[in-house]
Each structure stands twice: as structure tokens, then as C-alpha cells.
Image (cartoon, grey):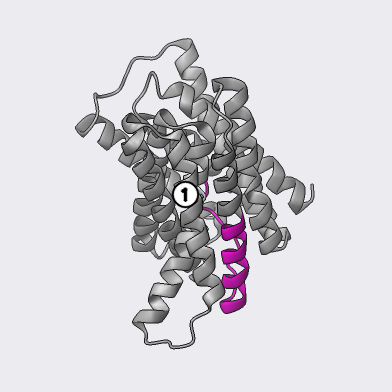
């Protein structure tokens, strides 16, 4: 399968995962869903690593801990946002990660004393945040303020996780090892947060267990599709196609949850997509593109 088709499939799988997360959120805390999603990932990625002969022994455990902390935080906030926001809104806020990365790049340049800032990057960041305002204003009521903040923060933490993935790639860590330790971190952190911060672990029904299994399976398959696509495809094309996840989430949200379709929200999503694609292209011109993108939706 070509890289483009793999990215389209991954985007659809992540949107379908969002549907399952939103349905499961009525029965489980977000941290529980993170735990079960990660357990499925540990099993699937561990089995694949064994089949491909990829060693899971690492020389940089501290880097994996840092990547997992940012990624699990982003994932937990994202799943929490799914429970309280329209499906496409939660998906869009997490996909702001590219815009956050551009903001980090601009901030770093200012801190280092750079004088010739790329104003196109600044414009992309500004357009992204205007898009956020358009997306949230028509779709978010007072009771949705915290899910909205959580969704926005999930995108910021996802950007930090992406930077950690880039550093791990430069340290020679293979993709499967990075995903495996992220899944381990998610399983452990999800269990601890559920027991300490949540209501403990809930009992299962057949319907609930099926949703949790679907979340983990869809997320893991999407992650593997992305990993393969970035290994064989062009990073900018893959990044652009990844934004189809917002379009798929919009359609699935209307189909399954009767989410409202408004002109303002649609324009906001288009602004965020355009800002994300532009920021990705400009970052690629300023610095070498990483080999893979493990964090998103991460999937963070």
C-alpha cells in the first residue's frame, strides 16, 4: 500500500477511534481509557517487534520517560475532551500541535536573539489561533469550558511529545521501540491516575469492553500505518493527508452524535488545517524533517 493510502487509512482509523472514545467516556474515566488503549498497544507492538526481530532494550530510558510523560498527558487530555466536546472539535484542537510547534520555534528564535523572523510562520500561528476561536465559539457552551481547555492543552503537549520523538529518532531508537515504551507508559500512568485521581477501575459490560478493545486496536493500527507511511513517503504530503482526520471526524460526528454543522466552525477548521500545513512546510524548510511522526494523534 502506498504512503498516501496509508495516511488516509490512518486518519480514518483515528477518527473512528474518537467515536469509540466518546462512546466509552460515558462508562469510563479518560485515564481508564488511556490505560486500556495502551495495554492493547503494548501487546500489538510487542508482538510486532518480536516478529520483526526489533530489540526492545534501550540505552536512553530517560528520553523514553520524558516522551511518555508528554505523550500520556496529551492523550489523557484529548480523551477527556472527546467526552465533553463535539467529535470534530476535540480532534481539531489536538491537531493544533503543528501550530504549537511553530510557536515554540518562533519563541526559541526570539530567545536566541534572532532578528530575521519568518513572518509567514508568525502568520500561520496567528491563523491557527483565530481558527481555534471560530471552532470553539459556536460549539462550546459554559459546561464545555474545561473540555475545550483540555483539548487545546493536548495539542500543546502533543507538540512537546513530537519533539521528544524527534530526539529519540536522532538517538537511533527504532519506531517500534518508541511506540512500545509510550504504550507501557500509558498503561502504567493510566492505571495510577485512575486509582489515585479517578473513581478507580470500573466493572465491564460486553459493550464497554468491546469499545475499549476497539479504541486500542484502532489506535494501534493507525499508529502502525503512520509509522510505515513516514518510512516510505514524503513527510510534507503525509502531514497534509493526516489532516483528513478532522474531515472524517466531522462526518462521523454528524452521523453518530448529530453534532451541529456551522459555517463558523467549518471556517475555523479550514484555518487550522491551512495553518498546520503551512507551519509544517515552513518548519521543513528551516530544519531537517524527522523520519516519523509517532505522537498523533497521538495520538500523542
Question: Residue at (35%, 47%) from the top-left corner?
Answer: 73
Residue 38, visible in the rendered structure: yes
Where is residue 3 shown, x and y percent of the image? 74, 53
Q: Is residue 83 above or below residue 58?
A: above
Q: Residue at x 62, y 42 (%)?
A: 245
Q: Position of residue 286 (x, y in %)?
A: 57, 78
| Vertical side of 106 occupied by 91: above or below | above
Q: Camera-side residue: 56 or 71?
A: 71
Where's residue 133, x and y in %? 45, 48
Point out the stretch of residues depicted in magenta: 274-300
**Relative to residue 103, is residue 286 drawn left or right?**
right
> Judging from the image, what secondary structure is the residue with disc 1 in?
helix
- Answer few, some or many: residues within 10 Å of disc 1's Cα (few below 14, many 20 plus, some between 14 and 19): many
Name the residue at 61% across, 49% down.
270
Q: Is residue 144 left or right of residue 249?
A: left
Mark 1 — residue?
132
Residues 85 and 74: in front is 85
Q: Is residue 82 shown above or below 64?
A: above
The question of residue 291 being in magenta is answered with: yes
Whether residue 180 is visible here, answered yes or no, is no
Image side of residue 153 versus residue 166, left or right: left
Q: Residue furthest left?
A: 196
Q: Is residue 262 magenta?
A: no
Quarter where residue 163 is shown: bottom left
In the picture as drawn, the residue positioned furthest to the right comes out as 1
Q: Measuring from the top left, give residue 59's x and y in whole percent.
A: 41, 65
Q: Camera-side residue: 255 or 137?
A: 137
Count of picture labels? 1
Amino acid at each position: 500500500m502506498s504512503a498516501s493510502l496509508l495516511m488516509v487509512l490512518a486518519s480514518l482509523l483515528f477518527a473512528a477511534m474518537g467515536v469509540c472514545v466518546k462512546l466509552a467516556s460515558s462508562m469510563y474515566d479518560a485515564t481508564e481509557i488511556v490505560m486500556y488503549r495502551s495495554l492493547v498497544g503494548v501487546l500489538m507492538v510487542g508482538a510486532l517487534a518480536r516478529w520483526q526481530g526489533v530489540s526492545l532494550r534501550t540505552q536512553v530510558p530517560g528520553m523514553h520517560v520524558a516522551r511518555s510523560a508528554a505523550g500520556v498527558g496529551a492523550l489523557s487530555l484529548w480523551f477527556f475532551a472527546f467526552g465533553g466536546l463535539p467529535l470534530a472539535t476535540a480532534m481539531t484542537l489536538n491537531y493544533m500541535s503543528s501550530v504549537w510547534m511553530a510557536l515554540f520555534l518562533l519563541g526559541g528564535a526570539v530567545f536566541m536573539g534572532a532578528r530575521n523572523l519568518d513572518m509567514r510562520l508568525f502568520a500561520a500561528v496567528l491563523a491557527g489561533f483565530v481558527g481555534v476561536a471560530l471552532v470553539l465559539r459556536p460549539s462550546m457552551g459554559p459546561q464545555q469550558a474545561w473540555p475545550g481547555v483540555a483539548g487545546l492543552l493536548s495539542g500543546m503537549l502533543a507538540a512537546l511529545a513530537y519533539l521528544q520523538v524527534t530526539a529519540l529518532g536522532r538517538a537511533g531508537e527504532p519506531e517500534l521501540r518508541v511506540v512500545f515504551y509510550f504504550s507501557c507508559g500509558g498503561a502504567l500512568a493510566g492505571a495510577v491516575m485512575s486509582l489515585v485521581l479517578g473513581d478507580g477501575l470500573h466493572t465491564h459490560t460486553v459493550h464497554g469492553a468491546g469499545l475499549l478493545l476497539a479504541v486500542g486496536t484502532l489506535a494501534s493500527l493507525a499508529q502502525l500505518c503512520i509509522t510505515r507511511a513516514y518510512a516510505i513517503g514524503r513527510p510534507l504530503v503525509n502531514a497534509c493527508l493526516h489532516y483528513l482526520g478532522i474531515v472524517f471526524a466531522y462526518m462521523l460526528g454528524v452521523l453518530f452524535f448529530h453534532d451541529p454543522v456551522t459555517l463558523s466552525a467549518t471556517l475555523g477548521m479550514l484555518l487550522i488545517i491551512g495553518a498546520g500545513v503551512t507551519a509544517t512546510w515552513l518548519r521543513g524548510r528551516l530544519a531537517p524533517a524527522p523520519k516519523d511522526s509517532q505522537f498523533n494523534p497521538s495520538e500523542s
